[in-house]
Amino acid sequence: MKQMSKIVRTITNLVYGFIIIFGFYVIVHGHLTPGGGFQGGAIVASAFALLLVSYGSLITKKFLKKDFLSIMESSGLTMFIVLAFLGLGITFFYNFLANIGGWFGNTPVIGPNPGDINTGGVIPLMNIAVGLEVLSALGVIVLLMASGAEFTKKKENS
């Protein structure tokens, strides 16, 4: 795949960071708003696809490494499984951080929630784990699809 026009690359440079930030926002605030780990991971992976379309696969593969994405995918999945088993003293997937105070355990107020991020207990951590897994897996899929398209194009030209 070759690069797109200078206009497309410039717009990609402008919006790429905002897409990544919005994806991580959706991941972290998934227990308060619609969204979560899967949706935020898909948003971040769409930023990877935008980078691939606008710059081509040769330049994009210098920035996005398949091996690094595979390690991040495994780390996210391992983090999710560990969090699921940490509550096993009571039940599988028990929210053991809820209502204990601190970063993820404040007691939510009665009535409308002001949107405190630290009222979800384990749920935000699980959203982060799922987000890492999804953005890495979809990133690897996008890179492999680009490699397959590149291989098919070379095969047709020869």
Image (cartoon, rainbow, N blue to C red):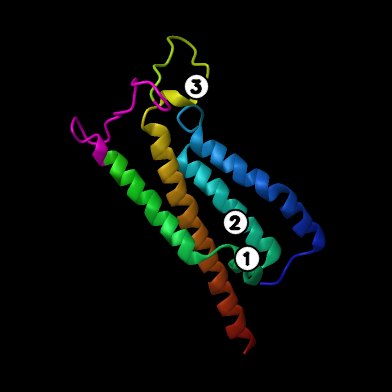
Give the camera-side residue of 55 and 117. 117
Q: Quarter holding the N terminus?
A: bottom right
Q: Looking at the rendering, which quadrant does residue 94 occupy?
A: top left
Q: Looking at the rendering, which quadrant does residue 125 occupy?
A: top left
Residue furthest out toward the front: 102
- The three-letter code of the residue at mark 1 reads Thr
Q: Looking at the rendering, which quadrant does residue 87 occupy?
A: top left
**Above or below — where is 72 with respect to 111?**
below
Q: Cα distance, mark 3 to mark 1? A: 37 Å
State the residue position of label 1. Answer: 60
- The three-letter code of the residue at mark 2 reads Phe
Where does the image place residue 81, in percent across and percent down from the top left?
30, 45
Task: Tell me, yes or no, if residue 35 can be seen here.
Answer: no
Magenta run includes residue 103: yes
Which SS class for mark 3? Answer: loop
Q: Cα distance, mark 1 to mark 2? A: 9 Å
State the residue position of label 3. Answer: 116
Quick check: marks 1 and 2 in contact, CB under 8 Å? Answer: yes
Residues shaded magenta: 85-104
Magenta run includes residue 144: no
- The three-letter code of the residue at mark 3 reads Asp
